[in-house]
Image (spheres, coloured by chain):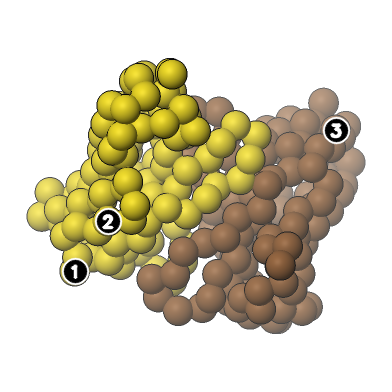
Chain colours: A brown, B yellow
Amino acid sequence: NAGVTQTPKFQVLKTGQSMTLQCAQDMNHEYMSWYRQDPGMGLRLIHYSVGAGITDQGEVPNGYNVSRSTTEDFPLRLLSAAPSQTSVYFCASSRQDSNQPQHFGDGTRLSIL
Amino acid sequence: SQQGEEDPQALSIQEGENATMNCSYKTSINNLQWYRQNSGRGLVHLILIRSNEREKHSGRLRVTLDTSKKSSSLLITASRAADTASYFCATDRSWGKLQFGAGTQVVVTP
């Protein structure tokens, strides 16, 4: 099993450009989420989904959109990139039960100039 | 806002020594989880301890939870160079929406 796969691994954007970070999992997990990790800080939750067609905001949702059309995929869209969105982005998935560990991808390192 | 706060921020030890790091949090939780992150990689789940549990073991790892003090500790016994990583605690208040601390950087020298 591949687990959680994120693409691309690295990306450089100019301010104002848009892009989509891809996340796919092959574990049939209902729950998926996106986090960002900034230097000196822990991960912060951007958006999450409890199943296909259902998404909700996390702690830092501004500037990001998500959709969940299938169980496997949970893309994160930056509509108009800003330098403050320079970060490392992690996707995670888990079973939709209480007390479940999260399975993380290896991250996308995004720089916005 | 960060729910978990780890202490210390950095820890340097020699192989064979034990490493202890602590995590404090602010509000009630369903569970508390510890993760490891190697440089340039994603987070790997180590241990999940539920709010009604006080101690849990997994191999060389021992986690304690004191809900009255809102704190947890992670002990790595007989450390190895491969244990060099950042360690994060994360609190789960509601269905997988984790709140992470800033992490403890552990360096184990041979």
Q: Amino acid at mark 3?
A: Val
Residue B71, which numbered label? none
Q: Position of residue A113 (x, y in %)?
A: 82, 26
Q: Residue at x 76, y 37 (%)?
A: A110
Q: Position of residue B14 (x, y in %)?
A: 35, 19
Quadrant of the rendered image containing residue B87: top left
Q: Position of residue A75 (x, y in %)?
A: 77, 62
Tell me how far mark 1 sits from mark 3, CA to CA. 45 Å
The crowding category of the residue bearing disc 2, from other C-alpha atoms within 10 Å (few below 14, some 14 to 19, many at least 20), is some
Q: Which amino acid, by three-letter code, is at mark 2?
A: His
- Image-quadrant location for residue A23: bottom right
Q: Nearer the viewer, residue B44 or A54?
A: B44
Q: Are marks 1 and 3 on the same chain?
A: no
N-terminal of the pair, mark 2 or mark 1, is: 1
The N terminus of chain B: image quadrant: top left
For the residue labelled by badge 1, is the local secondary structure a helix, a strand or a loop? loop
Asked whether residue B26 appears in the rendered view, the answer is: no
Residue to which mark 2 is pinned: B57
Judging depth in this view, the residue of A58 and B95 nearest the camera is: B95
Amino acid bearing label 1: Asn
Q: Quadrant of the C terminus of chain B?
A: top left
Count numbered badges in the picture: 3
* Residue that carries the numbered disc 3 in the rendered image: A12
Which residue is more in the foreground, A43 or A14? A43
**Mark 3, mark 2: which one is toward the viewer?**
2
